[in-house]
Image: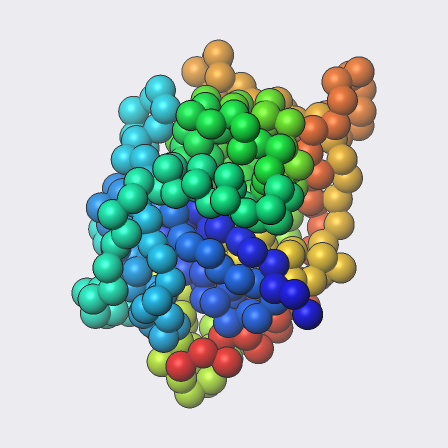
Amino acid sequence: MTARPIIIDTDPGQDDAIAILLALASPEFEVLGLTAVAGNVPLTLTEKNARKVCELAGRPEVKVFAGCARPLVRAQVTAEAVHGKTGLDGPDLPEPTMPLQAQHAVDWIVDSLRGAPAGSITLCTLGPLTNIAAAMIKAPDIVPRIAEIVLMGGGFFEGGNTTPAAEFNIYVDPHAAHVVFTSGAKLTMHPLDVTHKALMTPAWIDSLRALGNRTGAAAAAMLDFYERFDMEKYGAEGGPLHDPCVLAYLLKPGLFAGRDCSVEIETGSELTMGMTVVDWWNVTPAPANCRVINAIDSTGFYELIRSRLARLP
Ligand code: RIB
Ligand code: CA
């Protein structure tokens, strides 16, 4: 089996952390590096959290880069209310000792795509799309070299989680999302319409604790903290685990379903800023630019995560 080269662009975030652990536990991936972006918490914390998660996984050799510290146009919006002031509240993880790479994440993304065979690298984005858009703006030649971009973001029939119209990752940097969604790159989007169909349960979180490894204990502590916000907000028995959908989709696409649609990003109206306007019923002549995922096998999804985290220290 040839491992799929991936770059994970991320704003950890507890759900990002589970996604990164899933990737690092899966030999199907060659994780070329993590690129941190400002999102759930400021960049100084997202890059540190990315390194904490790599060390938790016993992978201090993974390259972690810091990217953009703010959106392309709008002021930074963060989500400490969801993720805590550190962005990774729950477990008490040690300060990272692995280095942060000196190169800017945007430059590294450009160099990586230029240096690899065209169509070989998949971009897995778990936060605002600022780094990806900045790379595309700086070096348009990289766009056809991207195998595909699989992203967590957006919402259509499910609405938004940050405003009634917009999901956090897209809301924070709608202009970056517009750049990516009009780039012509092959896109697969995991919106709230799929992530809200796979809610964690207390029993599943306990199954992570029962793994008996440090990864399971830390992941359970992260999710105990993280899910309280969504349970209070949605009144559900558990919260959605958004970002791991991106990696699970690449590992087991059969767990998911969707359709190719035209997707446009609202960047004009403040009322609907960051809305992903998905032409699900194909009522416009606009060509499809994105595969939109709206269905998931929740049982298979959570078992995949549990079984892979069992492989880590
Ligand atoms: O709306 C959910 C998304 O916003 C997830 O990626 C979460 O980590 C936050 O970044
Ligand atoms: Ca995220």
Say if residue 176 shows up in the picture. no
Quick one: 243 or 27, which is closer to the camera? 27
Whether residue 267 appears in this view of the structure is: yes
Position in image of residue 69 (x %, y %): 28, 35
Image x and y of residue 102, in percent = 25, 47
Residue drawn at (25%, 69%) of the image = 93
Residue 29 percent across, percent down from the top left: 56, 63
Q: Give the residue drawn at x 24%, y 59%.
A: 99
The image quadrant that residue 86 belongs to is: bottom left
Residue lying farthest top? 268
Residue 157: % across, % down:
66, 34
Q: Residue furthest bottom?
A: 212
Of residues 272 and 255, the one drawn nearer to the viewer in this rendering: 255
Q: Quadrant of the C terminus?
A: bottom left
User: Would residue 156 be found to the left or right of residue 71 on screen?
Assistant: right
Query: Which color scheme does this rendered protein use?
Result: rainbow
Q: Quadrant of residue 172?
A: top left
Residue visible at 32% across and 68% down? 60
Q: Quadrant of residue 103?
A: top left
